[in-house]
Image (cartoon, rainbow, N blue to C red):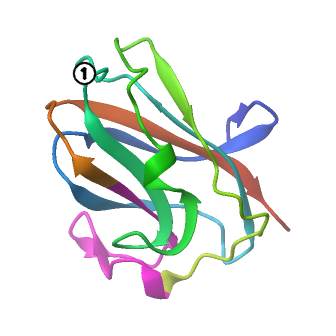
Amino acid sequence: MPVFDGTAILAVYKGLTAGTAADVFLPIPSGGKPVIFDKVTTTNASANLSTSTATIGVNTKAAAAGTAIVTAATGTNTGLTASSKYTDCTIAASADALTLSVADAPTTLNGAPNATAGVWIRVAGTPNVTATLDVYVAGRVLT
């Protein structure tokens, strides 16, 4: 895995739609081992999001359920005024190493059976700007 700021990039979601409230699943290849989430970064916005009221949250279950990794209130992306800008979202106060469960993942992913655990990215709020952005999740898989 590529190393970023002392931690590995665990997964990347390219082209997240920031103009529609929804949940999307992001597989994290942890092999059933605990994960410490260190950083969630948004970047490469296709439009200026400085006036967007949308927020980005990351949780262990869909619909902002389970353990919050990034709470939607702190996942704002108003600093994304160009594709070269980035925002490091605030990691939730939990100091837990999280063991992700396949039971919380969709049974199919991209039309194929899914057996990989992961996290859910939630776009919430009232999106008023149609744009896409990329989400990078970095952390450590404990052995």
Q: Is residue 90 left or right of residue 103?
A: right
**Which residue is pictured at 49% across the width and 65% down the height?**
59
Circle 1 sits on which residue? 46
The stretch drawn in magenta includes residue 106 = yes
**Which residue is pictured at 38% across the width and 76% down the height?**
114
Q: Amino acid at mark 1?
A: Ser
> Residue 6 location in percent, x, y?
82, 35
> Residue 48 location in percent, x, y?
26, 17
The stretch drawn in magenta includes residue 107 = yes
Foreground residue among 71 and 112: 71
Residue lying farthest to the bottom in this orientation: 103
Q: Quadrant of the C terminus?
A: bottom right
**Which residue is pictured at 27% across the width and 37% down the height?**
53
> Residue 52 location in percent, x, y?
25, 31
**Which residue is pictured at 64% across the width and 56% down the height?**
92
Range of magenta residues: 103-122
- Number of numbered discs overlaid on the protein picture: 1
Above or below 141: residue 17: above
Q: Is residue 140 left or right of residue 73?
A: right
Q: Quadrant of the N terminus?
A: top right
